[in-house]
Amino acid sequence: MTREPLVFVKSRHSQNGDCVQWAFTPGSVFVSDSKDADGPVLRADVAEWRDFTGSVAAGVPGGDGLAWCPDGRGVSVFRAGEPAHRLWFTAAEWSAFVAAARSGEVLGRAARSA
């Protein structure tokens, strides 16, 4: 069986094209950094994605599945308990993702219906 390639989207709030990007598949959401095509891709189930994006919208770092943490220059995103595989975003990139989380843009049809 051939696996379909992931189709990533990013926030309409992204100004320069570099941003948090995400792709929905049945039951999962994949997250990566658009400026690092060969970098890590993190996976979350739909419930973890809703929790993660809810914490982003509320401005509350942490998380049990996907987690995020500001570092003074930007924000790191990682799976809780697996900090070695991190995505790092500038403050401007993260701001676009926060706006997407607050507007509900990050919740695709799969995440809204699960």
Image: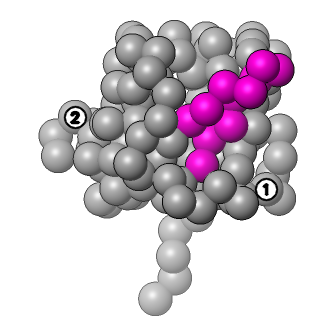
Q: Secondary structure at mark 1?
A: loop
Q: Looking at the image, what colour scheme do you see?
A: one colour
Say whether residue 103 is left or right of residue 34: left
Q: Amino acid at mark 2?
A: Arg
Q: Amino acid at mark 1?
A: Gly
Q: Earlier in the sequence, mark 1 or mark 2?
A: 1
Say whether residue 106 is left or right of residue 3: left
Is residue 48 visible in the rendered image? The answer is: yes
Across and down, in percent, residue 17 comes to 77, 23
Q: Quadrant of residue 74?
A: top right
Is residue 23 visible in the rendered image? The answer is: no
Across and down, in percent, residue 106 comes to 43, 28
CA distance separating discs 1 and 2: 28 Å
Residue at horizontal 71 percent and vertical 60 percent from the top = 84
Mark 1: few/some/many CA within 10 Å (<14, 14-19, 20+): few
6, above or below 59, in the image: below
- Foreground tag (1 vs 2): 1
Q: Which mark is residue 39?
A: 1
Magenta-colored span: 68-78
Q: Which residue is mark 2?
A: 112
